[in-house]
Image: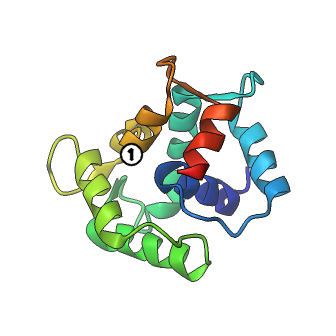
Amino acid sequence: MNLKLLACVMVVLATGSACAADGQKAREAFRQMDQNGDRALQFTEIQAARAALFDPLDANRNGVLESGEAKAALQRVREGGRLQMATAEGLENEARRMDANRDGRISKAEFAQFIPDRLLRADSNGDRALSISELRALRQR
C-alpha cells in the first residue's frame, strides 16, 4: 500500500480536509483499505490502516509517537499540500485523546485503536462502518 496515499486518505477521514490526491487515487486507496470488498470501511479496516501508518511516523523506532514526531509528521503533511482545513490545535487535541494511558506518548496500539469523533458521528446507522454515502456526506461537511 502506498503510505503517502494512505496518509492522505487518513487525513481526509480524520479531518475532512482537502487532499491533493486526485479522485482516482482516492478510490484506489479506498479499495486497498476495504479489505473485505464490501464497499464500506469497517472501523476495523480503518484501524488496520492506522496501524500500517504508525511505523513511518515513529521516526526513532521506539514504538511510541512523541511530541516531536507528531509535529514533524504534521509538518510533512502540510508541506505536501495534503492538509488545508485541519488546525494544529485540533490535531493536538486528537493526539491527547489518543493517549489513553496519559503518559504523554502514543503507542502503536493507542494510535491504531483510535477512531476520531468525526468518523463516529459519520457512521449514521451505527454499524461501525462507513459506507460510500456516509463517506460522501463526511466529505461534504
Q: Residue drawn 59% across and 51% down? A: 140
Q: Residue drawn 35% across and 58% down? A: 62
| Count of numbered circles on the image | 1
- x%, y% of residue 53? 54, 52
Taking the image as shown, residue 20 lies to the left or right of residue 120, namely right
Taking the image as shown, residue 73 lies to the left or right of residue 8, namely left
Viewer-side residue, 70 vs 116: 116
- x%, y% of residue 39? 75, 27
Q: Relative to residue 38, is residue 120 depicted above or below?
A: below
Viewer-side residue, 98 vs 124: 124
Residue at the far left: name it.
Answer: 102
Viewer-side residue, 131 vs 73: 131
Specify the quadrant of the image occupied by residue 87: bottom left
The residue singled out by tag 1 in the image is 111
Q: Residue drawn 61% across and 77% down? A: 81
- x%, y% of residue 8? 62, 60
Q: Residues within 10 Å of mark 1 (few under 14, many from 20)?
A: many
Confirm whether residue 52 shows in the render: no
SS class, disc 1 = helix
Q: Relative to residue 22, is residue 32 depicted above or below?
A: above
Q: Relative to residue 75, is residue 24 depicted above or below?
A: above
Q: Residue drawn 55% across and 36% down? A: 46
Viewer-side residue, 117 vs 1: 117
Three-letter amino acid code of the residue under disc 1: Phe
Specify the quadrant of the image occupied by residue 129: top right
- x%, y% of residue 27? 79, 47
Taking the image as shown, residue 101 lies to the left or right of residue 133, namely left
Q: How is the image coloured?
A: rainbow
Confirm whether residue 138 shows in the render: yes
Q: Relative to residue 45, is residue 50 depicted above or below?
A: below
Residue at the far right: name it.
Answer: 24
